[in-house]
Image: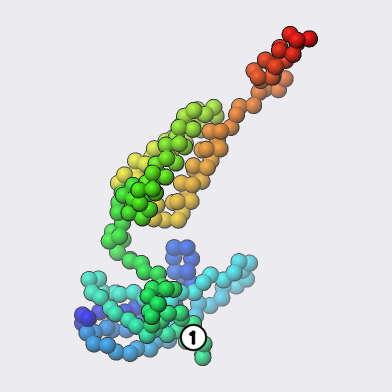
Amino acid sequence: PQAGSTLSISLCEKSLLNSVHCDWASVSAGPTWRSFEVSLKSPPPVGFRIAPRPPVALSLSNGSFGSRVEVTGLSLVDGQDELLGNGSFRHGLDRWFVTSDVHLAWRVLDTPLQVAFEQGALGVLAWLALGVAAIAVALRSSPPAAMTAAFVAAMVGFLAVGSFDSLLDSPRIILLVGLIGAVGWRSANRVAMPKSGQASPQIRATMRSRNSRL
């Protein structure tokens, strides 16, 4: 609806967070509807790879912050084959994913508030119970003190920083938190093995009891 806006179109390979091997095009947008057509090159294959090729995504972005660009009737054609699903948005946002490049526009900057917004009260209780239980198990455990201190410091640091930032909006950070929790939990539940040739107190008590009966 505003004059002077620009619609950018890209065809890229998608990794978890980034777009690579992109081909870009742009068209000007004005206050009236008009048709446009651009040519984009498909990302070239990269040598020999064992894993399957990453997915290719068509992306649209508005290059003029504060303006709005409306699109409909999109089509991505390779020869005679239509490659784009739901280009008319007849089924809402099915097969589309909406993001924002304006970093602070969507960040809550408070992890508990972020969890409450995304997962509700049950999500807050679940994360709180998980954190408290992990720290409690670590404090009651019998691994070396350095391991316990490192694990508790990591959890406390995560909670402290999470009070002033959104930490669960990146799959990598969520995976890191999960791995630290799993390692700390496993370390906290290890039972110290008796030294060679030395029976545990339970075994010694059983042996004394059997000897007394004999």
Relative to the observer, which residue lies in front, 51 or 69? Answer: 69
Q: Residue at image x 62%, y 71%?
A: 48
Element assignment for label 1: strand
Q: Is residue 142 above or below residue 91?
A: above
Q: Residue at image x 47%, y 63%?
A: 16
Q: Residue at image x 27%, y 61%?
A: 105
Q: Is residue 79 above or below residue 198?
A: below
- Amino acid identity at mark 1: Glu
Q: Residues within 10 Å of mark 1 (few under 14, many from 20)?
A: few
Task: Please provide percent x and percent y for residue 13.
Answer: 48, 72
Relative to the observer, which residue lies in front, 65 or 175? Answer: 175
Q: How is the image coloured?
A: rainbow
Q: For the N terminus, which image quadrant?
A: bottom left
User: Where is residue 198, by image quadrant?
Assistant: top right
Residue with the most extreme front position: 213
Left or right, 28 with reference to 38: left
Task: Please provide percent x and percent y for residue 209.
Answer: 71, 12
Left or right, 97 with reference to 109: right
Mark 1 lies on residue: 82
Q: Is residue 134 above or below residue 62?
A: above
Relative to the observer, which residue lies in front, 16 or 73? Answer: 73
